[in-house]
Amino acid sequence: MGYKQAVHTACLYLSDTQMTNQHTPEAEEAQLDENQIIALRREKLNAIRAEGIAFPNDFSRNAFAGDLQAQYGALEKAELDPQEIPVKVAGRMMLKRAMGKASFATLQDVSGQIQLYINNQGVGEEAHDAFKHWDMGDILGAEGTLFKTNHGELTVRVSKLHLLSKSLRPLPDKFHGLADQEQKYRQRYVDLITNQEARHTFIKRSQIIQTVRNYMVNERYLEVETPMMHSIPGGATAKPFVTHHNALDMPLYLRIAPELYLKRLVVGGLERVFEINRSFRNEGMSTRHNPEFTMMEFYEAFCTYQRMMEMTEGVIRAAAIAACGSAKISYNGREVDLESPFERLTILEAIQKYNPQYTHEQLNDEAWLKQEIVKHGEKIPPAPGIGSLQLALFEGCAEGKLWNPTFIIDYPIEVSPLARASDSKPGLTDRFELFVVGRELANGYSELNDPEDQAARFKAQVAQKDAGDDEAMHYDADYIRAMEYGLPPTGGCGIGLDRLVMLLTDAPSIRDVILFPQMRPE
């Protein structure tokens, strides 16, 4: 069965009304629902199968559309045409204009788009006639020579045309792509086909992560891999996902952070290590939270949290320049200055900067703090101590106002179970968190390297867990054993890479920068 016959056969199942004024395959499709379109395209595929190999893999391209545009796009027609530069391109057909003896099509590959010119003289009448029945979304290979149209568009004059993959499902509206945001997340493959912005976002994401990796390697850090399944979850205060190992008949936890394993490596003498890691937390979902996420954690022996702040600042600035061409970027219509030195404030300084009406006495009054925390819509924290109350108030009244990058430093000991206590500030730790556009982007500290202090803090966390805190830490006896061999003075930090990509691509939701975000089943 030939193409024309296939189209005719499929259309026999349509009503007279549906068939009125349909003269081309494109017009036919425009008036059909999706199931009818798929049925029509399957008939075409059956016809192709009957004539030979339906999904050939014998075409080899030698050029990308974007590279050709960059190399030859600026040449004048009179300069380009006589060269008759031979090319082989391949991609998805996004536009098609079939007109008698000559047709045009637009191919899209990962680098961009290029126009094809197909006529009877170039490919032969039979191949041209077959092309007229191909559909938008089909994947083609084309051989030919470059020329410029009278309108100055770089085009391939096709001498051979190959249908490489038949598209059975119609693409969404070519001007609008997927309109439903949830559909974009569920069917990312379609979003990437039709949405240039989405493609650029994920290409940029890759560039950002590569820049981060290069920056770390240039600082003499060693990239390592640590387990994703832990017998004891640790390294962060978070609720883990639980799984089960059948052979060992034991529960395992998807890692909430790689911290404790990375510090074991520092004990072992790998003095500068980093891991670009996937972590998992069984918590709520929001524009800033996905159950699985990517971060980078890094640890350096013989340094303090001050060095970690410098590293964090350097990494983020380098990523911004690589992704955006500048360290002064725009987010949600407002400038974000990643070029100037990042501001540093304590929790109390940040609270008072944005709430000058609060007095020092009030901020050290437990009853007043609890009242004010509730007023700002926050929950009273389970951790005891004035410091945890001050932190909760900060989260309610100041955190969201930190637009330009700001390091909040010197966190209370009761909310920092793995951080080193300050030598000069009782009750505080050598810890920082970085906030940009009102969101936490990084968390770092001088590591606690006293094994007895660490054991005592683990025990306090266990008590909190017993009291009902799902996010409190377990006691990790092996980590304590590792520390007893001697952990050198060490600084460590974790940077949320998904949130960094959000910032540098001006994305409002974390789902916009994760290729396949977690969704409810359809």
Image (spheres, grey):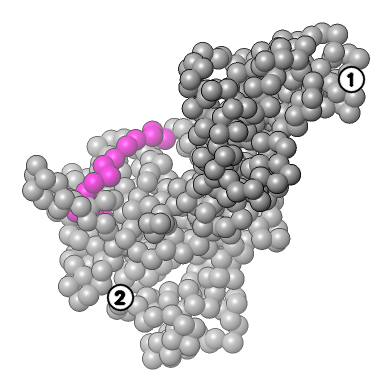
Up-down: is 229 above or below 233? above
- Judging by the rendered image, the residue that carries numbered circle 2 is 383
What predominant SS class does the magenta segment belong to? loop
Element assignment for label 2: loop
Residue at position x 71%, y 41% in the image: 22
Q: Quadrant of the C terminus?
A: bottom left
Q: Disc 2 marks which amino acid?
A: Ala
Residue at position x 19%, y 46% in the image: 482
Up-down: is 463 above or below 202? below
- Measured from the top left, where is residue 368 in percent x and y? 43, 91
Mark 2 crowd level (few <14, some 14–19, many ≥20, 10 Å Cα): some
Q: Could you say which quadrant of the image residue 28 lies in?
A: top right
Residue 397 left/right relative to 337: left
**Which residues lie in the magenta part?**
221-234
Q: Disc 1 marks which amino acid?
A: Glu
Q: CA distance from mark 2 to mark 1?
A: 71 Å
- Judging by the rendered image, the residue that carries numbered circle 1 is 76
Question: Which of 262 and 483 lies nearest the eye of the viewer?
Answer: 262
Mark 1 crowd level (few <14, some 14–19, many ≥20, 10 Å Cα): few
Q: Is residue 156 magenta?
A: no
